[in-house]
Amino acid sequence: MTRLQANILLLLAGAIWGMGFVAQSTAMQAIGPFLFIGLRFAIACIFMLPFALREGKRAQNALSAADWRGFAWIGVILFLGMAAQQVGLLTTTVTNSGFLTGLYVVMVPFLGVLVFRQRPHVIVWPAALTALAGIWLLSGGGAVALKPGDWLTILCALCWAFQVFFIARAASGTGRPVTLAVMQFAVTGAIGLAVALAVEPMEVPAITMALPEILYAGIFSGGIAFTLQVIGQRYTTAPQAAIFLSTEAVFAALFGAVFLGERLPSAGLAGCALILSAILMVELVPALRARRAAS
């Protein structure tokens, strides 16, 4: 798979997440956040399990115990991020949540330098800041007054940044992206259901009411989109992947216009343009420099 094809997969993941954000927030009108997390990722695990088993049969090398521990650790990070975002939505607005979650676009290159000692391509820095400015404009372009839910969403962004890095390391090293995805779904779903059993009511009528959102979030936003992320990250860098995944905000605005009749103001359109500009930066500038060096 080429880097361009991998980036297209990451764009597709962003599109699926953008459409599923409404389902993620409306489901909590019927059930609690941890029950929603547990059910959606249990469904994601079941849906993708046959593909993981098929991948395992075709694999030339077996996974080591360290590989399985790494996959499980990514599942723990995914749960922490999802829990922070879902609980945060109870006390913050969707607008603030969308913008603050996008902070991971800038956190990824910083973590690469500070924690993993990996310096990204120089174009990543202005591209990440451009993408963040675009997300801010898409969210309304106003001041963000931080509430408890906002701080939880910032924690979510930090978890996403770590998840992007650990996936990049594990997916490229093992060559088992679908197995990695299913393992993280299983861990996240199990922890979510365990917490829900302890702190939330579990009523069948409520679950039935939220079933459409659970199924979409489980099969599409969970099973398919997160698997596309893992596959795509095998062939691109973590900072570039974060920028491509930030298109979630653009697609959320697009689907809001198509399905809900919402219309973007001029600031929102400018935000879309900035995010797309950031994508063009990280896609074209390294390629042009490589071509000049080769010539």
Image: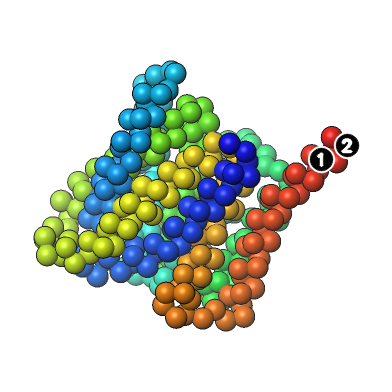
Q: Residues within 10 Å of mark 2 (few under 14, many from 20)?
A: few
Q: Residue furthest left?
A: 204
Rendered-image quadrant of the C terminus: top right
Picture residue at 43% right of the left edge, 50% below the top: 225
Instruction: Determine if residue 83 is in view.
Output: no
Is 191 situated left or right of 204 in this image? right
Q: Nearer the viewer, residue 87 or 54?
A: 54
Q: Nearer the viewer, residue 291 or 40?
A: 291
Picture residue at 28% right of the left edge, 52% below the top: 40
Look at label 2 and name its amino acid.
Ser
For label 2, the residue is 295
Q: Position of residue 85 (x, y in %)?
A: 38, 59
Q: Position of residue 290 (x, y in %)?
A: 79, 39
Q: Residue furthest top?
A: 61
Look at label 1 and name its amino acid.
Arg
Which image quarter: residue 264? bottom right
Q: Position of residue 157 (x, y in %)?
A: 47, 54
Helix or strand or loop: what does disc 1 sit on? helix
Picture residue at 54% right of the left edge, 53% below the top: 11
Q: Are marks 1 and 2 in contact (CB under 8 Å)?
A: yes
Is 116 situated left or right of 50 in this image? right
